[in-house]
Amino acid sequence: MTAETVLHNARIVLADEIVEGSLVLRDGFIAGIEAGTSRTGEDMGGDYIIPGLVELHTDHLEGHYAPRPKVRWNPIAAVLAHDAQVATAGITTVLDALRVGMDEDADLTSADIRKLADAIEDSVKQDRLRADHFIHLRCEVSAPDCLRAFANFDGDERVKLASLMDHAPGQRQFVDLETYAYYYQRKLKLTDRDFKLFCEKRMAESARNSAPNRAVISAACQERGIVLASHDDATSGHVDEAIEQGVRVAEFPTTEEAARASKEAGMGVLMGAPNVMRGASHSGNVSARTLASDGLLDILSSDYIPFSLIQSAFFLGDVVEGISLPQAVAMVSKNPADAVGLTDRGVIEQGRRADLVRVRVDDHVPVVRTVWRQGSRVA
């Protein structure tokens, strides 16, 4: 039996325009888009209908599993809590970022990470989830156990993306050692002497492990068809290295130089939605608003605040000159979906998945009113 839903009296955000009219959903897909008021159905009251959001990098799940130091929650319960929050923020496809490679600041173990991955897989199979979940492996290439942890995901078809990270002092995000000290010495509560020893150890591990681990992981990802991302590139030299490794997404470049070089190399440039909303990076790096204004921003990620994804799209479409709402919405839907090969979603057009969000803007804040995944209401 054919299941059909008609959403009428909506402002439908298409790839390059906004149409006032009706949207026809049939058997989980978009069957038609009609301008005007001829259709009847579920009245959207003039609200926006946008594509379901696609999130490539959120480590929000780990916080539900380990909400306090030494506390471990039931992994399935953690996945369900995370899923509920992302879905009600309008995210219908999420790549849950799980860390492989642990160092002194990591509260979780590789066994914890595998438990979370298994909980995701089990929850998908048991149809417990509102959003469509995949995995993004955040590979800390300077860590001694990085390759062992990466091997825990051999054959895991839910892995769609892997990023190459090095958070050692003097590297990428932390070229400025004062910034590194402000972040890590305070976090780990180290004396000056202990912090100096900590830095020396981390730098030695980076020198020893980073290059070989990058090579092994990039080769494995190419063989398995996993999209590769760089992370915190700061210089054109970093981008040259990323090109050699087959990187297709530039995550959180820390300078305009790196963002521009990545864009010119054909990579999708990804920045944090919280950076957009705050007007600055929390660690003092380049502003995502600046990159957006300069045409150097392709993809947004909620990073650590799920709701920031939809918030940043409507903010950019309203505030940044030269960026329309359809263009801003593409940064949180079509562009991230295309970047990881999920070309059946991310845009409202006939034949695409009916992953949709009904949004009303109230005092410049987007209010998520309804969320559909494959035509079924999930929030």
Image (cartoon, rainbow, N blue to C red):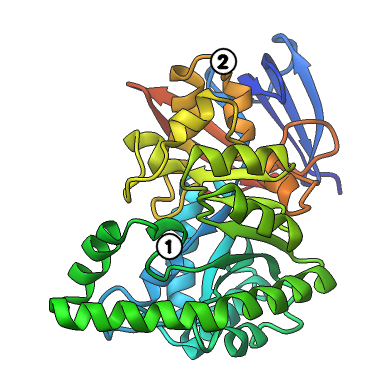
Mark 2 secondary-structure assignment: loop
Whether 155 is drawn above or below 334: the answer is below
x then y, percent, for residue 239? 64, 52
- Residue at figure coordinates x 39%, y 45% from the top left: 285
x then y, percent, for residue 91? 55, 48
Give the total number of marks visible in the rendering.
Answer: 2
Crowding near the residue tagged with mark 1, few <14, some 14–19, many ≥20 C-alpha atoms within 10 Å: many
- Residue at figure coordinates x 60%, y 37% from the top left: 260
Query: What residue sits right under mark 2 in the picture?
Result: 322
Mark 1 secondary-structure assignment: helix
Crowding near the residue tagged with mark 2, few <14, some 14–19, many ≥20 C-alpha atoms within 10 Å: some
Residue 96 shows up from this direction? yes
Q: Which mark is residue 22?
A: none
x then y, percent, for residue 238? 59, 55
Amino acid, disc 1: His
Query: What residue sits right under mark 1 in the picture?
Result: 60
